[in-house]
Amino acid sequence: MTFIGRILRFLFWVLIVSWSISLLRRLLTSFGQAGTNRNEPLDVPSNTVARKLVRDPVCGMHLAEGLAIVERSGGQAVYFCSEECRNRFIGEPKKYVASA
């Protein structure tokens, strides 16, 4: 009976030690994440996510087609990342046509 008792006692202490380690790990990670919540979802509506990327001819930035500002120029759609880039393009369209 002493052999089985020793095995059960050993298993009990292994369980206690593993539980203590997992509790300490949770405690340390919660202190590390005090200021940030890593489980927050992104604030992008799902209907604006596109399947392809478009390029802004002014700054060269690539972005999703659904998130871009669209301007018609010469019968073609031109995509911009911001109002500032769109206004630059409208001011001097010939300067940016080659890079579109």
Image: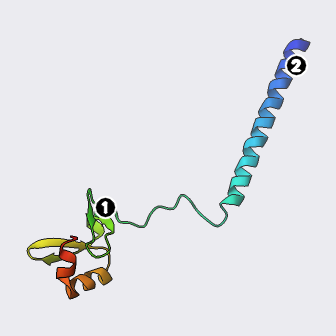
Residue that label 2 marks: 6
Picture residue at 23% right of the left edge, 72% below the top: 79
Picture residue at 72% right of the left edge, 47% below the top: 25
Which of labels 1 and 2 is toward the front? 1
Residue that label 1 marks: 49
19 displayed left or right of 50 = right
Report helix, strand or loop for mark 1: loop
Q: Position of residue 35 (x, y in %)?
A: 64, 67
Quadrant including the C terminus: bottom left
Q: In the image, what residue type sits under mark 2?
A: Arg
Picture residue at 91% right of the left edge, 13% below the top: 2
Report helix, strand or loop for mark 2: helix
Residues 85 and 46: in front is: 85
Q: Kindly give the residue lying farthest to the left in the view shown.
A: 75
Q: In the image, what residue type sits under mark 1?
A: Val
Q: Position of residue 70 (x, y in %)?
A: 21, 74
Colouring convention used in this rendered image of the protein: rainbow
Sequence-wise, which precedes: disc 1 or disc 2?
2
